[in-house]
Each structure stands twice: as C-alpha cells, then as structure tokens.
Image (cartoon, grey):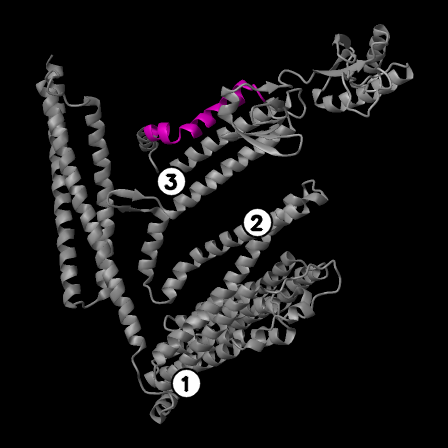
Amino acid sequence: MRFYSAWVAALLAALTVLCAATGHAQSTRSEAIEDAKSAYAEARAALETGNIVDPAAMERRLRDLRDESRRRLASVDREVEGVRGQIEPLGPAPGENDPVESEELAAERTALNQELVRLNSQRTRINANIIEANDLLARISASQIQSLYAQLIVRGASPLMPPVWLGAVDSAADVSGRISKYFSDWAANKDESREYASSIGVIIGALVISLLLFGPVNRWVTATFSHAIERRRPTPTRRVVVAGLKMIARGIPGLIGGVIILETLRAQGVIVEKGAAAAQALWFGLIAYLLVSGFMSGLFAARNPDWRLGGVELKSGRHISALIITIIIVYGLKTLLDAILVATGGSGNLVRLIEAASAIIVAINLFLLCRTKLWSFGALEENQPSSSDIPSRKKPSGVRLLSWRLFRRIGRAVAIVTGVAALLGYVAFAEFAASRIYFLTIFFVLAWFVRATLKESAFWFRRRIKDGADTTDADNDEDEQRAANFQFWSSLLINTGLFVALLPALLVLFGVPASNVRDLAGQALFGFNLGGVRIPSIANFVVAIVIFVAVMALTRVAQRGFQKGPFAHSHIDSGVQNSLITLIGYAGLVVAFFASVSTIGLDLSNLALIAGALSVGIGFGLQSIVNNFVSGLILLFERPIKVGDWIVTASGEGTVKRISVRSTEIETFDRASIIVPNSELISSTVTNWTHKNRIGRIIVRIGVSYNADPELVRDILLKCANDHPLVVRYPEAFVVWQDFGASSLDFELRAYLSDISNGLKTRSDLRYAMFTALAEAGVEIPFPQQDVHVKSLPDGLVAQGPNSASA
C-alpha cells in the first residue's frame, strides 16, 4: 500500500512538471508569435515610409521569420491532431435528453476543448503572420524590380564623347600596369621560394593535357561516333544524335580541361580571391563558346545537306553560325573584362565604354541575324536527296513561317533599340538588353537540343512499338492519323514541359529576384494554403497523372497478356473472355482513379460525403445513365449475351461487337452498327441464337405437285440434307409434311447446323440441291393456279369452250 501511494505521488509530480513545462513552452510560443507580428509591423512601416537602409537584409530577416512561423505552424498542427485524438475516444457530448456524464469526464472534455480553442487561436495568428510575411516580401520584390528598371532608363554620358574615351584610355593603362605588376609579383615570389620553374612546368603540363582534350580527344569522338553515324542513312533521330555528339565532343573536353587549368592555377597561386571571378568568367565563356559552336556545326553548317537539321543553304548556315558565335564571344569577353576591372579597380569610363561597345556589336550581329535572305527555306526542297531511301523534310507551314517572320521583325527592333540606346548614353539599358540576348541564345541552343532529343526519342519509341505490331495496307491511313495525333500531343507535352522548366530562369533573367522565383517554384512543387485549404502542388498533379496513366497502361498490358496467354490457350468461350477482360479494365480504372486522387491529397472520406450529397441528384438526373451502367455490369456478370453472339432485339438483329459501360454495339448483317442501351437488353425480350452453343436449326419449305409420290419427295429432301457438309448427323434432319396446300403438297426440311451463323448460306445451298434433285426425279414444283368461270359475255364475243377463260 505504501509503495502504491508513493507511485501515485511520483506520477502526479511528473504530470505537474510536464504541465508546467508545457505551459512554459506555450507561453514562449505565444511570445514568439507576438514578436514576429511586431517585426512584421515594423517592416511594413519602413516600407510605407521608404526608410529602408538595407533591403537585402530586411528580406533575409522576413524570410527567417516566415520559416520560423512555418515550423511553429507545423508543431501546432501536430498538437491539434493530438488533442483531437484525445477528444475522439470521449465520444460526442451528451444532448439535452441524454444522461449526464460524470464530473471527471466532463472536466476532461472541457479542458481538452479549451486546449483545442487555444491551439486554433495560435494557428490562426501564425497563419496571419505568414500571410503578412508573404505580402511584405512581394512588396520588397516589386520595389527591387521597379528600382532595377528605373536604373535602366538613367542616361549618362554617350560613349562617343571625348571625355569618356580619354578616361577609358587612362584607366586601361592603369589596369594594364596593375595586371603586369600582379604577375611580376607572383613570379618574384615563386623565384624567391625556388618554385618558379616547377610552377611553370605544372601550368604547362595542365595546358598540354587540356589541349589534348581539345584536339585528339575531340577528333577521336567525332571520328568514332559522329562520322560512323554519318556514313549511314540519315534519319531525323540520327541528325539530332550527330548534332548532340558534335556539341558534346567540344563541350566535355572544354569542361574538363577548364577545371584542370583553373585548379592548377589556383594551386600555384596564380589565381587568388580577387582573380577568381575573372577566371570563372573566362571558363564559363569558353564553355558557352564550345557548346554553341558545336551545336551550330550540326544545326546549320554541316557539309552534307542531308545531315543538316536547319533547312537553310550551306552558305546561309555558315553566316548564321558565325553571327551567333560572334555574339557568344563578344559578350563572353565583355564579362571577362568586367571581372578583371572589378578585381583591378578600373574606372567607370572604361567599364562604360566596354559595355557600350559590346552592346553595339551584339546589336549589329542580331540585326544581321534577322535578315530575311539568311532564312530562305526554299532551299530545303531544292537540296532534297534524290534517293527515296532518305526521309524528306517538309517545308515549314505557313503559320510557322508567319511566326518566324514576326520573330525576326521583333529581333531587328530590339537590335536597333539596343544600338541606339548605347550610342545615346543609355548604356545600362543597352548592356541589359545585350546580356539578355546572350543568355537567351544559350538557352535557345540548349532548349532546342533537349526538345529535339525528346521528340526524336518519343518518335523512335513509337516506331519500335509499331514495327513489332502486325499491320496491313488497309491500316495505313489510320496509322498516319495516329502518327499525326501522337506527334501533336507529344510535341505539346514536350514544349510545355520545357517552358515550365525554363520559366524560373527566364524570370530571373528579366529581373525577378531569385528568392521570389524560388518561393514560387516551392509553392508550385509543394503546394500552398489558401483560406485554410491545402492546394495540391503541380508536382502532385503530375505524379497523379503519371500514376493514373501507369496503372491504366499496366491494366492494358494485363488485358493483352491474359488475352494472348491463358485465354488463347484455353477452351474458355470468346464471350466469357471478353467479359473477363472488360472487368479487368474496369478494376484497373477504379484502382487508377483512387490512387491518383490519393496522390493529389484529397480526402476520400470527403469524396464519400460529396457522393452521398449528390446521390439524390444522381438518382433523378442521371437515372438512365446509372440504369444503363448497372445493366452493363449485369450483362458482364450474368452473361445473357456475349461478344460474338447472334441476337435479335426490338432494335434490330445482328452480332454483338462490344459491351461497354452504357450501351452495347450490334453489327447487323448489312454491316451497320446499332447502339442499344444496356437497360433495353435487360428489360426487354432478346433472342440469342448462340447463347449456350452455336448449334441451330434451319427450316426449308417447298411445295410439290399433287401427282408426286410423298415418300419419294421425303427421300430426296433427306438425301439433300445429309449430303450437305454443314448439316450435322445428330440431331438428324427430318422432313415434315406440313399441309395440303391450295396448289401443292407442302413439305418442310428441318436440319441442324453446328454453327447457326451459316444458316443463310446452307438454306440457299439446300434450295439449289432440292430443285435439281426434284427435277431429275420428275417431281413438279407447281405454282398457284385459279379457275375462273364466266357466266355471261359481252355481245360480239362467242365462247369457244368451257376452258377458254382458264388461267
């Protein structure tokens, strides 16, 4: 007993300490929430008054506060879920007419509800702080963009003014002296430490290795892969591969060689902290030049027109490549000189002159690049190979040519504005435009190559699937339409994906702060809250679509596998096979739907509530659709009719071709399709000639003369039936003497066929045989006769006999 009392006391003490710690934590959290709110209020006041000393520091501070608020919100959400989990076992609160619950239970329920109210209050305040932080960050971003574009329209001294040139010349001499002194000091330091010769040897060795990568390795890759492919038949896929190999053959050696040289120079002390930016600018400019020049050689400047991706003449292609590469080289040199001037402290006049000169050169090259004669696509048809083995390339459509013409006009306008702005003194604007042209050129090259690679990979994959399928000449038109549809949708998907992938870089390129772009990308990838509702991310939607498509593809594979595997090697009826395959498709559709919905993050219980609320509307508004759907399921499970059955309905007669969710397709013997709602097949009478099996009976009626021997007629008819190959021996055929007709003795030949679908042909064959056999036996097949007795004749007509008016 004493031990039990001690244990209870210890437990109460622990609970007391835990409550105290929890209360202290809650107090600390409330204080942090209020502190964040005060910080946001101060930041808003500073923005409204324009009293911001360091916008970047304020932005970092707001982002830190927002991140803390998000972490705090996650903690509160976990606690809310925990409190709700404690309230749920207590059950609902008693109503007015319900028995009163115990005091302990009521006190516990009240305490938990108060805790839940307090946590929800904190969550509301935290969400308000996050919204406030987002609004402030958006205002800071807008002010930064506004400040950037305001600086672009500030006019300074024109680069044509003599003071600018004189100041630039003096600054250039000063920078040159500082660079010379820097290398002299480095050489002197190495000479003192007796490391000069070894350092020079190491640097020369790094240069030799880089040259080997640029030269022999480049030629080896080109000769081994590119030239080997070019000796084969040119196809769109191989053209893209050759262009990519040329770009990689130049870019990869430059990338590896640049790293070797930079690290060697840094290890030998040639590159210090101040010169690191200049070295990186040189390396980046070299990589950009190698990639673009390699791609241009495959895109426009290939010697063999059959391997040229761009549909222009060789001379025009070389001019286009030269102009684009000139833009890359000029702006790369400008970036290198800017980094050198920053490291050596060059004057503003020299920086201004370099930026103006590079902008003017880039503008001139862009203007020349947009000339119409360079983009003459008429040569595309003239240079087509004569051999039919080489796939031809179509001339661009009128819409594409019109868009390209508009694009060239915009390019010429940008070039003129950039050049004129640089001459008039708007150097910042001109440099901004030139830099956008430079980066857009690199983006265009990389995006074009990725786009072409993805498109050709998709087409190659489709061709491999098509080559493995059995096709006939009758399927050519349909296959061409499917190929056109595949090309359209695959191109749309690839273009959209590339645009979405490049959109963040384009936003940063045109002045949107990278932090804001990162926030937008994060919201798109991970979702965001709107009014307390969690909006799924684009990534979730994409994953959901991928899962849906993947599950449906696996379902199709499973259907084909069962159809070509177990079902093809079993004695299961074809109608049963079709029902099972259709049910597999329905099951896959249900699994794909719920899997994709769960991936998006939608609560399936909420969907159940919505479905319950809509059940009344479905019961009235969609009654016929639901009726047909349920009837379709009954047809699949009960199988009164199956695919391939010959049925007769009120809507028509024919063969069942397909049983879908809503209706059943019946193909008549005239090759017409009748779409019958499934409910009609369930509620109405249906004649199924092939329900259990395909054995059926046919009846052939015939009349013979009254002078014929009935037993002889019976024997002849039975012989005709037994001689026919489609008539089964069991059940046996038999003849029925149907009646004494008005003009003939009426007989019926009743025979059984193993496949009733051959009934029409068999009846026709039997009629031919019966007519021939009866004629050979001398049995007459009469036609209807009628005797007419005339009681009186008009005057002038004399009756010649009692049978004169017989017919």
* Contact? badges 2 and 1 (CB < 8 Å): no
Give the x, y percent position of residue 272: 39, 71
Which mark is first along the chain, 1 or 3? 1
Q: Hey, what amino acid is under mark 3?
A: Ile
Is there a contact, CB below 8 Å, between mark 2 and mark 3? no
Asked if residue 624 is among those painted magenta in the image, a careful observer would answer: yes
Question: Mark 2 or mark 1, which has the lower sequence index?
Answer: 1
Mark 2 or mark 1, whichever is nearer to me = 2
**From which residue to which does the magenta span run?**
615-641
Q: Judge depth for marks 3 and 1 and give the one in front.
A: 3
Q: Would residue 606 appear left or right of 401 to someone viewing this image?
A: left
Residue 769 position by quadrant: top right
Q: Is residue 543 visible?
A: yes
Q: Could you say which is closer to the camera, residue 706 or residue 402?
A: 706
- Tell me which amino acid carries mark 2: Phe
Residue 293 is a magenta residue: no
Residue sitting at the far left: 103
Q: CA distance from mark 2 to mark 1?
A: 60 Å
- Reading the image, the residue beneath label 1 is 176
**Disc 2 target residue:** 486
Circle nearer the N terminus (2, 3): 2
Q: Which residue is mark 3?
A: 600
